[in-house]
Amino acid sequence: MLVNALTRPSDTLYFKFEMWDSDEPVPRLELLKKVKGCDGILCVLTEKIDAQLLEAAGPNLKVVSTMSVGFDHLSLDELKKRGIRVGYTPDVLTDCVAELTVALLLATSRRLIEATHEAKTGGWGTWRTLWLCGHELANSTVGILGLGRIGVAIAERLKPFKVKKFIYTDVAPRPELANMIEAEYVSFDELAKQSDFLAVCCALTQETHGICNWNLFSKMKKNAIFINTSRGGVVNQEDLYEALSTGLIAGAGLDVTTPEPLPTHHPLFTLKNCVILPHIASASYTTRNAMSALAANNLLAGLRGEPMPKELKL
């Protein structure tokens, strides 16, 4: 959504909106053409807000509001240099993402996609002792890479499954959050070695790009389940494929990939022990409505020069 501010003779501030009315992303050239002279932009994570786009928009641009909690699609240095304010949508999607993460973890560890396929295609025969056996949460150690609001919410939902221990690693210990779920801070290597289930919840930054690679997978248990609902860029997918295809780890569940959508011929789709979802962690009616409203209110507040409900401090 592109916005231009208009002042009427009464000094009342009005806004003229132009919306891209399609579920498909705005073609890049179209976006570069349309942003010229606009005062505000409301975007989603498929729109790359970089120096090229900001240059095309020109000096009128005051605010960018993204309908996402992640902001790796925004060039923050360029926005800061131009004095452009940024709104985003944290908190409102925490519960929804945590629910989906738990669902993905269970689907992967209990092999639900495989089981459904077998039931549909005639593989369901007589009862067999170890057929489609998976791994359960009871008495397990759950590791969290990047302990924030979502990581805490995931742990809160997993606790009733009789998880024995929660561990986490981050750039530094986060005792206030950790105390909420009785989680122990460990090193990155210990997180890999101890976790029966490893949930990735960190933001995508220069430091975390590709952090889940062979170095991590080679230290994990053979029965470990790897889950990523953060950003695809934190995972080296070639290394993950090798770890899964050689039995180095038991399984992986991914809601995010690189690129998105992941090409249907990608090797990860050939693996029975890899469950891939099309980035739907925040896809509930309640959450998407809340994200939309928050993104719109951030945009309007920024255009009026008022405090945003949720502003990213640059």
Image: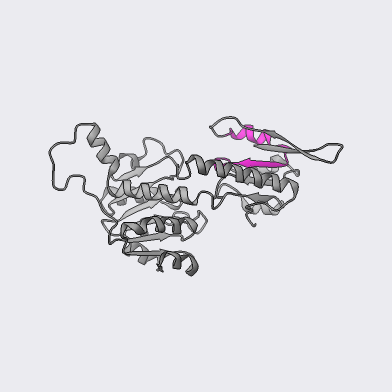
The range drawn in magenta is 26-47
In percent of width and height, residue 177 lies at 48, 65
Task: Tell me where residue 12 sits by quadrant.
Answer: top right
In percent of width and height, residue 182 lies at 40, 67
Residue 290 position (above or below residue 213): above
Question: Would residue 134 be found to the left or right of residue 28 on screen?
Answer: left
In percent of width and height, residue 292 lies at 58, 41
Question: Would residue 196 be found to the left or right of residue 77 on screen?
Answer: left
Per the image, is 33 magenta? yes
Pick the residue in front: 67 or 257.
67
| Residue placed furthest toward the right | 9
Task: Tell me where residue 248 sits by quadrant.
Answer: bottom left
The residue located at (70%, 50%) in the rendering is 84
Residue 106 in view of the camera: yes
In percent of width and height, residue 26 lies at 58, 33
Of the 4 image quadrants, the one containing the N terminus is top right
Pick the residue in front: 286 or 307.
286
Question: Would residue 257 be found to the left or right of residue 117 on screen?
Answer: right
| Residue placed furthest toward the top | 21
Residue 208 position (above or below residue 8): below
Task: Tell me where residue 169 sits by quadrant.
Answer: bottom left
Residue 85 position (above or below residue 122): below
Pick the residue in front: 130 or 53.
130
The residue located at (36%, 59%) in the rendering is 159
